[in-house]
Image: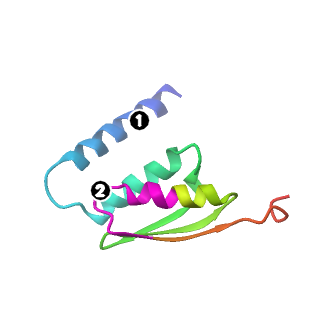
């Protein structure tokens, strides 16, 4: 367990260092940052969302339970350095489908 936590922390520090470095922001850097933000957010809980990035345009696909999760995912993605646009294709699961 401690090894996993240390690995995540190390990855986060490396990623932060890369993001703070001077130079152009690549699609891969944007992708990594969006994935981390979505997965770690307590509202979105975005581990099951699919993210694609092309020329700074982030496309998010998947399904969530509530509208606030959908909106928050787009907001988080828009806040990432280098993101030019967010295409939010997230759908809301019906309550009856999840029961």
Quarter of the figure with residue 91: bottom right
Residue 37 screen position, x and y as percent:
45, 49
Give the residue at x 25% y 49%: 19
Please tell me whether mark 2 sits on a helix, a strand or a loop: loop
* Colour basis: rainbow
Any magenta on residue 79? yes
- Depth check: 4 or 28 in front? 28
Q: Where are the magenta residues, as a range?
A: 73-86
Q: Is residue 5 above or below residue 52?
A: above
User: Can you tell which quarter of the image residue 94 is in?
Assistant: bottom right
Furthest residue toward left: 22
Q: Please, is residue 44 above or below residue 89 in the view?
A: above
Kind of element beneath mark 1: helix
Residue at image coords 60%, 55%: 69
Q: Position of residue 63 (x, y in %)?
A: 64, 64
Query: Which residue lies under the disc numbered 2?
Result: 81
Marked residue nearer the N-terminal end (1 or 2): 1
Q: Which circle, 1 or 2, is nearer the viewer?
A: 2
- Badge number at residue 7: 1
Badge 2: few (under 14), some or many (20 or more) residues near its Cα, within 10 Å? some
Quadrant containing the C terminus in the rendered view: bottom right
Q: Residue at x 36, y 41 (%)?
A: 11
């Amino acid at each position: 367990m401690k090894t996993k936590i240390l690995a995540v922390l190390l990855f986060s520090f490396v990623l932060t260092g890369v993001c703070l470095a001077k130079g152009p922001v690549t699609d891969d850097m944007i992708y990594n940052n969006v994935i981390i933000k979505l997965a770690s957010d307590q509202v979105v809980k975005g581990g099951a969302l699919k993210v694609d990035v092309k020329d700074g345009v982030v496309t998010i696909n998947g399904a969530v339970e509530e509208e606030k999760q959908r909106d928050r995912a787009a907001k988080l993605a828009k806040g990432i350095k280098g993101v030019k646009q967010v295409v939010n294709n997230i759908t809301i699961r019906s309550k009856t489908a999840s029961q």
